[in-house]
Image (spheres, helix red, strand yellow):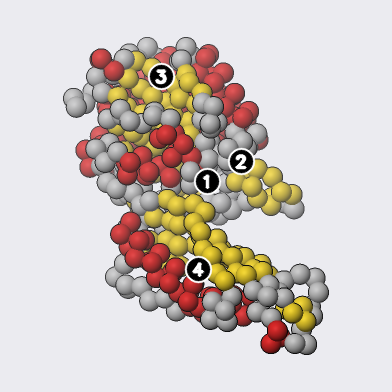
Amino acid sequence: MKDNINRWVTQHEETIKSTYHYLHTNAEVSWKEVETTKFLCSKLEEIGIPYETFDHHTGVVGYWGSKEEGPIAGIRADMDALWQLVDGKWQANHSCGHDGHMTTVLHAITCLKEIGYQPKGLIKIIFQPAEESGKGAKAVIESGVIADLDYLLGLHVRPIQEMPFGVASPAIYHGATTLLKGEVKGVQAHGSRPNLGINVVDSLGAIIQAVNSIKLDPTQSASVKLTMVRAGGDNLNIIPDYAEFGLDVRAAQNDVMAEVLEKVHHAVKAAGSFNHAEVQLEPQASMVAAETSPELEEIVKEAIVEVLGEEGLVPAPETPGGEDFHFYKMTYPNLQATMVGLGTGLSPGLHHPTMSFNLDALLNGVKIMSLALVKVLEQKV
């Protein structure tokens, strides 16, 4: 099987990279991946894979095989891009590698189909929208697609800070992430009579100080920081009565996240309202920390070693970044799920507007995901 996969990937290198370039050039943001969905549907049609689209989100799921023949395994790629300022122009931009993820999953399935593989079970090919919103996985879960899965494979390109080109890990241990948006409401007044107003800038100053003063367990990995503040208008002689702010909260474990959020809410409300301003704090997006799936990770390790050799297998990185992929296992605890970390030489870093990576990594990704999927379907559940 490995030799057949290797030959197919070598023969189709140009096509694989061409798919990546198309998706990279035609990036679309969360919930608006309309043309991306059409493209993926057309490619599934070309290889004879039936698929399903949805009324309430832009994802697409392909189906190959039969659940009567063995396990039910999913293989998932995220679809959306970020909205970024790139070379002075605001645009949808694939700076998180989702174009590479779609390319890898699409061609892993195409490879297996064209070399004549017959699934020993059912494969669900899941192209998930809106990962960057933190809500895309939840939309797929609500569609009922994940409920009967035994296994779920994902993949994410890794930055040079975590691993070099030419290696891969059997998992990525993402931390939990919560993004909060706050509002402060005060009372306007003339700048000469501040005693008649409630200055929301004073509240922001107190909130910043309070957040920076939160004490966290030094043995646990966690952080809280303000990432956005807006207050006032063009006139400098008016006490402003409205402000917005944003918070980025991260923790390595889900229980630590719960503890940190409790402290954040208390600190923000107490500090921001010291001058009688009204403070509201609401979550905008959240992602849970990864939970391990040892059985599936061992299967993926075997695939990585067969493709890249022993030297190509590296430990799963513990990363402060977030991924909504992990909602799948949190929703269905018995699901074996893991996300392959693919070394790509990616620099200068994920979410940088001019991020780039060695496209030969896509070839490694197709080989690993193809072989891992075959190995997964050989399991008896």
Q: Which residue is mark 4?
A: 225
Toward the front, the furthest residue is 196
Kindly check if marks 1 and 3 are in contact, taking CB atoms under 8 A apart as contact.
no
Q: Please tell me whether residue 124 is drawn above or below residue 305 in the rendered image.
A: above
Q: Residues within 10 Å of mark 3 (few under 14, many from 20)?
A: some
Is 163 placed left or right of 376 in the picture? right
Give 349 or 252, whichever is nearer the viewer. 252
Q: CA distance from mark 1 to mark 2?
A: 9 Å
Give 254 or 195, whichever is nearer the viewer. 195
Q: Which residue is mark 2?
A: 29
Tag 1: amino acid: Glu
Residue 148 figure quarter: top left
Q: Which residue is mark 3?
A: 63
Q: Position of residue 317 (x, y in %)?
A: 35, 52
Q: Position of residue 242 (x, y in %)?
A: 66, 69
Q: Residues within 10 Å of mark 4 (few under 14, many from 20)?
A: few
Kindly check if marks 4 and 3 are in contact, taking CB atoms under 8 A apart as contact.
no
> Which element carries disc 2, helix, strand or loop?
loop
Q: Which residue is mark 1?
A: 132
Kindly check if marks 1 and 2 are in contact, taking CB atoms under 8 A apart as contact.
yes
For image coordinates 53% across by 40% down, the residue present is 130
